[in-house]
Amino acid sequence: MIIGLTGSAGAGKDTVAEYLTSKGFKKFVYSDYIRTELEQEGKPANRNNLIEKGNEIRSKHGTGELSVRILADIDRDQIKKAVLVGARNPEEIGKLRQRKNFSLWFIDAPLKVRYERIKDRKSIKDNVTYEEFVAQEERENSNDANSQQLKSVAVLADETLQNTGEIDFLHQQIDRLLSKIEL
């Protein structure tokens, strides 16, 4: 079983993934694959660089390349239950849809709640003003086939989870979805 998690920055993808790992899922993060390339180039892994490098990878190797890399690792390690965090292009989802037992979940939360969350986590990639945060979000919704297209990915989701802040409610939503898809 492969569960893909998508959503805007600060929506709670990692929180959902953490809960799924407690249920035996192995976590794979799209940005880790991008971050590795940035490190090799000596560039900081801030959000703008992650977006640009991800777009470059899609442009050079195909828009589904990041999913291809993750699926290769899943296959190599014979992972039976995987959670994939951060797909942002429809073709990335297309590659995942080729697998049986794949489900895409969109994690959502209000914009201001998400901004407060990213500020609280104090990550280098999130050191931005509110205005910069909004501008970055707009970049994640490009019409360029090689870029992030988060809104296009969101409509492909099999399920949507509302992460408004109550962790117990979020866990209940996850448990309900798992009961629907697990054998």
Image (cartoon, helix red, strand yellow):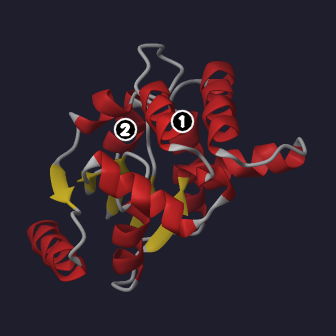
Q: Residue at x 25, y 50 (%)?
A: 110
Amino acid type at mark 2: Ile
Q: Is residue 11 above or below residue 131?
A: below
Q: Can residue 18 be seen in the rendering of this structure?
A: yes
| Residue 42 image point, x, y percent | 90, 45
Q: Residue at x 60, y 34 (%)?
A: 51
Badge 1 density bin: few <14, some 14–19, many ≥20, Cα 10 Å: few
Residue 155 on image: x %, y %: 21, 33
15 vs 180, left or right, is: right
What residue is disc 1 on? 132
Q: Amino acid at mark 1?
A: Glu
For the residue pair 98 and 139, the one nearer the viewer reads as 139
Instruction: Please name which of the two marks, 2 or 1, marks the residue nearer to the observer.
Output: 1
Residue under the image location 38 percent in, 71 percent down: 15
Across and down, in percent, residue 124 comes to 68, 56
Rendered view: 80 above or below 129: below
Q: Is residue 83 visible?
A: no
The one nearer the camera, 41 or 111, is 111
Q: Secondary structure at mark 1?
A: helix
Count the marks: 2
* Residue hosting label 2: 93
Placement of the C terminus among the 4 image quadrants: bottom left
Label 2: state its secondary structure.
Answer: helix
- Where is residue 37? Give x, y as percent: 78, 44
Query: Which tag, 2 or 1, sits closer to the chain's start?
Result: 2
Q: Residues within 10 Å of mark 2 (few under 14, many from 20)?
A: many
